[in-house]
Image (cartoon, rainbow, N blue to C red):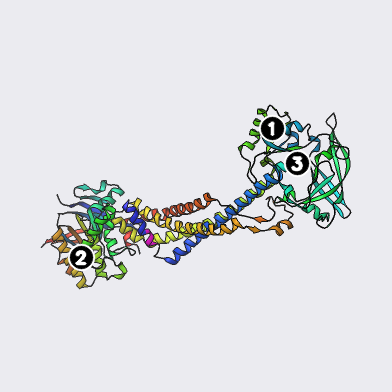
């Protein structure tokens, strides 16, 4: 072991032979590692926040839908709704879950000042509150009440329709929609319907999907003749564990498999045409955006790493070339090939370790304000209509990722060490006498 | 049996398709405690012979035995270990490691041998004292004169008490006064420690110090003298 300690000491001192070159190489590694830690933490923060916001404001942990509806879900096929929903919701509640029935359909909202296409959610306000939290973010006015033709609008829709509840009374709107119904032979019929309602609230929650061109209206009023003529029909039931912590991602108990098992334990079997789907099955836009960002960031960081590792490779190549004679002398003294390789690996590893260490420190220091305060992109995000996949409206915060912080330093050290092997092997192929004569 | 025996030792170098016979069949025996100079003009094969005996190069033909071991049968690692345990080298250009102090340079062979640190420091200090550099142990090579650096190189070669020390033109880079001092030192150590010294030279003054003188010419032994 003593030889390793002495080789390490020698490697450390060898770094001081060309201080400027060593400092430049170390800086390259430090910047790469620091940037990687920063970018990873930022992406992780955005992903964590997005996931939390999807679960807390948009979907819950799972949805129950008809299989036929799920396959065409992007078309909002109202004719694939199901009934009755109450026994399912009650069974879920008995099994320890909060459940919220919904009827989702599209329509156009008209006011005296204009119109806007919207997606409308028929909801049971009391049950919806137990699953999702967007009702806590009614920016102006209040949330709609059961039994009344009242709607809460997303902020974008309200702005488009020039509805400002802060300065005035609730505003009357007309909803024009097409009701799709299936007859006994399975043929889809279209019925045009107009619903009059009053806008009582504007929603601006941390999830942009709740603040867009959307409207929330009590489900019970939709069932009747003044609504959608769909007696007791819903298109989906949102599910969340009744004791789920605020901001927590769904646990194992909230997986479709566990929910089905819990329903069976309370003696309820889901009808065969219904299926429980995970929240992940509904956020392809977010997954695509996150994956795209991850890939592009990784490519960028990989290029940076390649550049800094080329710097290390060059430094080691020059060091080994310059010390060919010294290698010959060490071999003449009786150093084996393995020991010579080890001595140069230690030297290169030290560059990686020092650079990686500084990078870890820099990345972590930058992370502190990014985790605690983040960057406010609210105006830019709103300008884009909040349509960029991530479910964040304003503050883009980072999140700590100890694994990445530790691993990036370790990888920098190991890769640096490995980069010294090819030039050392090349030097070792030279006969000792030739090494000794090398100038 | 000698400490080193060579039998019909040959070494060829081929450059641009031309083969040069650096050694054309040398058979010699060196006994323990010898203080021998290998002399001859440039290109006579002195350095090549020392390098082959030191297992730094591989012969084209013939045999070398060191303490009875045929080195031609050894692997790269075994050759490295043979050099580590049995042979000390002194080079014309000193070849000290610039980032290490004199003491650290001298203790390097002991480190390779796994000698405990405390003992290695003690022995290295003694070796430096033996070459007259007891006070300069903390200096780095660039802070020393050529003569002092060569003394450090001698201390490094001797500190592990090898059975054989090979010195390739050890005084070629030194002025004649320093060169004489170095040779005196080598002779003293040869007598006091019984270490076998083989050194190459083409300097007549250096030859005067040798008790056995071997003349090489064109890769062959031209003559031998015993003093």
Residue closer to the observer: A126 or B117:
A126
Q: Are marks 3 and 2 on the same chain?
A: no
Residue A58: tell me if it is visible: yes
Q: Residue furthest left?
A: B227
Residue B67 spot, x, y in % from top left: 19, 49
* Residue underneath mark 1: A94
- Do the CB atoms of the residues marked 1 and 3 lie less than 8 Å apart? no
Residue closer to the observer: A404 or B225:
A404
Q: Are marks 1 and 2 on the same chain?
A: no
Query: What kind of element bears circle 3?
Result: helix
**In this image, B162 relative to A380: left or right?**
left
- Chain letter of the residue beneath label 2 in the structure image: B
Decide: is A108 above or below B22.
Answer: above
Residue B223: tell me if it is visible: no
Q: Residue A269 occupies which quadrant of the picture? A: top right
* Residue underneath mark 2: B131
Task: Determine if the magenta segment contains residue A286.
Answer: no
- Chain letter of the residue beneath label 1 in the structure image: A
Which numbered marker is on residue A126?
3
For image coordinates 67% across by 44% down, the residue present is A55
Kindly report the distance in space between the C-alpha atoms of the residues bearing marks 3 and 2: 96 Å
Residue A311 spot, x, y in % from top left: 48, 60
């Amino acid at each position: 072991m003593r030889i390793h300690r002495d080789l390490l000491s020698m490697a450390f001192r060898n770094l001081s032979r060309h201080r400027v070159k060593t400092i430049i190489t170390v800086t390259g590694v430090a910047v790469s590692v620091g940037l990687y830690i920063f970018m990873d933490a930022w992406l992780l923060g955005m992903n964590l926040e997005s996931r939390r916001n999807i679960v807390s404001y948009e979907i819950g942990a799972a949805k129950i839908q008809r299989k036929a509806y799920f396959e065409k879900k992007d078309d909002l096929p109202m004719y694939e709704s199901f009934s009755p929903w109450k026994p399912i919701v009650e069974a879920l509640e008995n099994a320890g879950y909060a459940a919220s029935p919904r009827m989702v359909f599209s329509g156009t909202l008209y006011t005296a000042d204009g119109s806007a296409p919207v997606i409308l959610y028929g909801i049971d306000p009391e049950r919806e509150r137990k699953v999702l939290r967007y009702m806590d973010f009614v920016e102006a006015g209040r949330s709609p009440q059961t039994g009344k033709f009242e709607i809460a609008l997303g902020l974008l829709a309200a702005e488009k329709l020039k509805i400002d509840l802060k300065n005035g009374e609730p505003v009357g709107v007309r909803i024009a929609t097409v009701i799709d119904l299936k007859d006994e032979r399975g043929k889809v019929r279209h019925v045009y319907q107009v619903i009059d309602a009053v806008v009582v609230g504007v929603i601006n929650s941390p999830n942009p999907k709740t603040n867009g061109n959307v409207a929330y209206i009590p489900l019970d009023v939709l069932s009747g003749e003044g609504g959608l003529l769909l007696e007791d029909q819903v298109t989906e039931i949102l599910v969340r564990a009744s004791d789920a912590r605020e901001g927590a991602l769904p646990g194992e108990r909230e997986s479709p498999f566990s929910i089905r098992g819990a329903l069976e334990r309370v003696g309820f079997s889901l009808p065969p045409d219904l299926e429980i789907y995970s929240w992940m099955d509904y956020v392809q836009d977010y997954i695509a955006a996150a994956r795209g960002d991850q890939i592009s960031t990784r490519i960028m960081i990989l290029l940076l790493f390649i550049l800094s590792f080329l710097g290390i490779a060059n430094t080691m190549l020059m060091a080994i070339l310059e010390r060919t004679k010294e290698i010959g002398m060490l071999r003449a003294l009786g150093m084996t090939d393995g020991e010579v390789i080890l001595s140069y690996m230690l030297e290169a590893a030290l560059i990686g370790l020092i650079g990686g260490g500084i990078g870890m420190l820099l990345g972590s220091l930058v992370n502190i304000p990014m985790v605690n305060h983040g960057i406010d992109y609210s105006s830019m995000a709103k300008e884009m209509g909040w349509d960029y996949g991530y479910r964040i409206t304003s503050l883009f915060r980072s999140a700590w990722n100890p694994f990445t912080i530790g691993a990036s330093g370790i990888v920098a050290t190991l890769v640096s060490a490995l980069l010294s092997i090819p030039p050392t092997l090349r030097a070792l192929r030279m006969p000792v006498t030739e090494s000794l004569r090398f100038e | 049996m000698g400490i080193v025996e060579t039998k019909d030792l040959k070494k060829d170098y081929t450059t641009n398709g031309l083969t040069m016979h650096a050694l054309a069949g040398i058979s010699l025996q060196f006994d323990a405690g010898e203080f021998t100079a290998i002399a001859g003009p440039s290109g006579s094969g002195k350095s090549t012979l020392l390098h082959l005996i030191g297992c730094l190069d591989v012969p084209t033909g013939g045999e070398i035995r060191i303490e009875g071991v045929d080195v031609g049968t050894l692997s790269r690692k075994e050759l490295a270990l043979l050099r580590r345990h049995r042979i000390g080298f002194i080079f014309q250009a000193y070849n000290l490691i610039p980032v290490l102090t004199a003491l650290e340079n001298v203790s390097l062979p002991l480190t390779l041998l796994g000698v405990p640190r405390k003992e290695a420091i003690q022995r290295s200090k003694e070796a430096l004292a033996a070459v007259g550099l007891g006070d300069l142990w903390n200096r780095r090579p660039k802070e020393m004169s050529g003569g002092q650096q060569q003394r450090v190189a001698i201390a490094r070669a001797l500190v592990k008490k090898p059975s054989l020390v090979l010195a390739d033109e050890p005084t070629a880079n030194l002025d004649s006064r320093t060169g004489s001092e170095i040779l005196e030192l080598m002779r003293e150590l040869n007598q006091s420690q019984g270490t076998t010294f083989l050194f190459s030279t083409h300097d007549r003054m250096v030859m005067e110090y040798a008790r056995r003188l071997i003349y090489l010419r064109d890769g062959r032994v031209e003559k031998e003298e015993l003093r």
